[in-house]
Image (cartoon, rainbow, N blue to C red):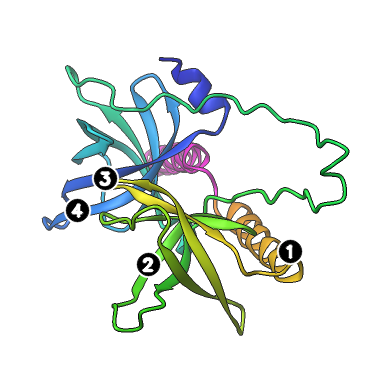
Amino acid sequence: MNNSANSENGFEFAVRLWGMDSEGHAFFQNATAGKIKGNTAQLSGVAHPLQPGDVIGVQSGQKKARCRIVWVVDAGPVRKTEAGIELLEGQQIPWPDPPAEKIVVEPTSESKGRDNRKFVRHKIFFPVEIGFEDESRARMQTNATDIGGRGCYVETMMPLAIGTAVQVMFWMNDEKIRASGIVRTCDPHMGMGIEFISLDDTIQQKLQQFIETLDTEAADSNPTGAEAAEAATASGNSESTSANSKSAEDKA
């Protein structure tokens, strides 16, 4: 397994977390992991209070492991809490292998007349509501964790079957958008990929720009976990130096 490739390629994947939070409450939730390096990784989307030294369970697919929290930072309303984790001694690495590198095929002369624009997917928490043609079925209030102009990925313990027709509702500022969709991928106990099939080009482009703005704002307003940890260390060293200087002055 090439863990360095995971980190270099920005590979992220869904995980399940459980354990006791820093307030003594049991919790169980889905989150996102990435930035793999050996036996360490970074979590995002953590919705429960944690602190360095806490031990939690992490599951990716069928693989489970116990990890220690190394650092924690508030990453804002989109990515919620981010945390660095390290596998406990004796635990097997649960990280999945990164996906195979995609081969880009140049469009043929037959396809040049079609719209071949690619919409980059962004890994942000984006509130959506999923409904059905059969209005007697309960709607799902959830978050997409990966979204672009042509579709999204929704983490859920009970994903819908491939081919299921859905209605996806979401807001762009004050505008409510309703899109017909089809479930294209289904990962049991993990989530599902939905393709938008009714959005016209203008709305797709508008959605893409809206998501890119959210992602950029989140990145600009929140430091990465490593940056936050370094800042906290620098702040602690500065306070310690200041305290030592004051102590020396008092003695003088």
The reply to whether the magenta stretch includes residue 36 is no
Give the numbered dot on residue 16.
3
Q: Quadrant of the C terminus?
A: top left
Bounds of the magenta span?
A: 223-252
Looking at the rendered structure, the kind of residue marked 3 is Arg
Looking at the rendered structure, the kind of residue marked 4 is Phe
SS assignment at label 3: strand
Q: Are marks 1 and 2 in contact (CB under 8 Å)?
A: no
Q: Nearer the viewer, residue 85 or 228?
A: 85
Which residue is painted at 52% across and 43% down in the image? 224
Q: Earlier in the sequence, mark 1 or mark 2?
A: 2
Please identify, in this view, whether the residue under mark 2 or under mark 3 is nearer the observer.
2
Which residue is painted at 81% across and 52% down in the image? 114
Asked if residue 53 can be seen in this view, the reply is no
Looking at the rendered structure, the kind of residue marked 2 is Thr
SS assignment at label 1: helix
The reply to whether the magenta stretch includes residue 227 is yes
The spot of residue 160 in percent (x, y) is: 33, 58
SS assignment at label 4: strand
Q: Earlier in the sequence, mark 1 or mark 3?
A: 3
Question: Label 1 belongs to which residue?
Answer: 205
Q: Are marks 3 and 4 in contact (CB under 8 Å)?
A: yes
Give the numbered dot on residue 28.
4
Q: How far is disc 3 from disc 4 in space, using C-alphas? A: 7 Å
Mark 2 Cα shell of 10 Å, populated few (<14), some (14-19), many (≥20)? some
The spot of residue 5 in percent (x, y) is: 52, 20
